[in-house]
Image (cartoon, coloured by chain):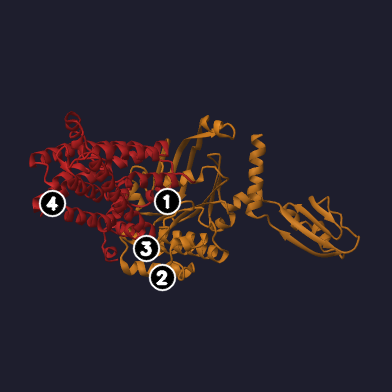
Amino acid sequence: MQNIIEIRGISKSFKTYETRSTGIAASLRRRYHIKKALDEVTLEVREGSITALLGRNGSGKSTLIKILTGILYADSGSVSVMGLNPWKERMRLAREIGVVLGAHSQLYWNLPAEDAFKFMRHIYGVDEAAFKKRLDYFTNALNLKEVYRKPVREMSLGEQMKCNFVASVLHMPRIVFLDEPTIGVDIPSKAALKEMMLEMQKENGTTFLITTHIVEDISVAERIFLLEKGRLVFDGSRSRLEHLFGNKRVVELSFSGGAAPRLSGYGRVLAHGKGFARIEVEPRMLKNRSFIEMLSGRNILDYKVAEPGLSAILSKFYARLDKKRR
Amino acid sequence: MQLFDRPNPYLAMFSVALKNSMAYRADFLMTLASRFVQAGLMVFIWTAIYHFTNTNSILGITLSTIYVYFFLVYAFRSVINMEVPSVVQQDILEGSIAATYTRPIRYPLQVFVNASAGDFISILVAMLPLLVIAFVLYGAPLSVPTIMLMLAELAIGYALVSLIGFMIGMLAVKITYVYGIIEATWSVMLLLGGGILPLSFFPSAVFNILMLTPFPIMLYMPAMTFLGTASVGEIMGSIAVSLAWLAVFFLASLVAWSRVRKSITSAGG
């Protein structure tokens, strides 16, 4: 697979302001400063892959998406999306991409989503038969049949997000940029969105780049980029992230009576109460004979081994970044 | 809508914008109805002026001509308006310009198409009835060349006000809020375009200078053409001056847009 997106050392700054304190007089005295939203970011995305772009609020995720889609200019560095410069060849690029911006709707507030879908058909020159087939497929899969003919203002936030997704993929783009695509979307629809992404990837070789705060959204991602204060701080697979920051396992034990097992030699005891204990251990400990014998002991009623979720891994990652900065 | 089945994206955009403009029907119709009320108000004010000055004619313009003049002005104001900068400012403030930029459409064209959809409805619902009233009050037949010249002037005026409006809208990229500038420009345009009083009421030196500005073609000259008080030479001169302004504003808009485009930041994440 070749690279479909190549970013080399891009930076982007914005002029922002803040007032020194509250009150009318203070609001007149603004302090301007330059905020570096992206700082020398270099990365590549493989064609046909599903890639996640993670980061905390203000880390530069949305700015990066806006640069890749030609909305914003970069101050320096170079960007190639399908061999095109997004700012100089925006019109050509826009024909080949689909974009869901969580904060900015593709729909018309006063009109049914159907009008926006038809509008997209004309913009991208989709023939009517293909349009009907795709619309039928997407609205069925995302449970929108009863919804897309009513005005957008009467839809729930989740329904609007799903309609935005449909509006952005009706022309079967080669790359789909999803910026916070699951705000307000219910659990079955989230699953349907993931299913649809995997199917579009498999059938059409569509590339997806997803930015999100919701870690469950990126379960389909093969590769993860992590941005922190405009800098790329991690580039790798989910398993590498897990290996680096989530290689511990948590074992929860319940035992009978007052016969508490001795746990301190196996790992870090997280909790120890009457008939209950939780201990964090290295994965190799799960094969350790002494540990297994302890788990099989008569007084152990039950035990459960849990892997840390991605949320926990990221929390750990951010905690380490913050500690380093201090 | 039938228009929707045609392949042109801008035609499809026009069709959606038409539907969108009519979404809140009651509010839309009340806004249009206000034009009739405003025209009636001008009739009332000028009747009072003529009554208290105890005259039938001011600077050669009779009261009945003034009635026709203001019905014409309010008819033309259905399309001569500040819709374009309002649309641009809204897009900048809400950040919806970002969504537009992800589609293969040109933003300036989208703005003009969206604004023209609203103006199209205004033509049907407000401009045509007001023109009919003006015609009835005028009480004399209009020749085809007169109508053609008036429409040509109005078209140039419409293009000028749209370009001026777009340039004001572009300021929103830099300074975000341009309501004040829109209001101030609109007031100046109304005064210098003949929307408050006929330009012939100004001293002749001022009048001659005003005729070299881009404003008379928006309201005053089409009304004078309708009333038959402007000669063909005056009309052609005004059209020539206005076309020159149109070229200047068009080129200025292109240059300004190519610079401003790089400063778009898209509010709201």
Residue at x 40%, y 58% (from the top left corner)? A108
Q: Are marks 3 and 1 in contact (CB under 8 Å)?
A: no
- At label 2, the amino acid type is Asp
Q: Give the Cα separation between the discs numbered 3 and 1.
A: 37 Å
Element class at badge 4: helix
Foreground: disc 2 or disc 3 = 3
Q: Earlier in the sequence, mark 2 or mark 3?
A: 3
Q: Are marks 2 and 3 in contact (CB under 8 Å)?
A: no
Q: Nearer the viewer, residue A269 or B228?
A: B228
**Which of the 4 image quadrants contains residue A277?**
bottom right
State which chain disc 4 sits on: B
- At label 4, the amino acid type is Ile
Q: Does mark 4 fall on the same chain as mark 3?
A: no
Element class at badge 3: helix
- Quarter containing the C terminus of chain A: top right
Q: Classify residue B258 as left or right of residue A294.
A: left
Q: Give the Cα separation between the discs numbered 2 and 3.
A: 15 Å
Foreground: disc 2 or disc 4 = 4
State which chain disc 2 sits on: A
Q: Which chain is red?
A: B
**Which of the 4 image quadrants contains residue B23?**
bottom left
Residue beneath label 2, please?
A136
Q: Give the Cα separation between the discs numbered 3 and 4.
A: 37 Å
Residue beneath label 1, please?
A2
State which chain disc 3 sits on: A
State which chain disc 1 sits on: A
What percent of the width, then of the height, locates residue A101? 46, 52
Residue beneath label 3, please?
A115
Q: In the rendering, which numbered label is found on residue B147? A: 4
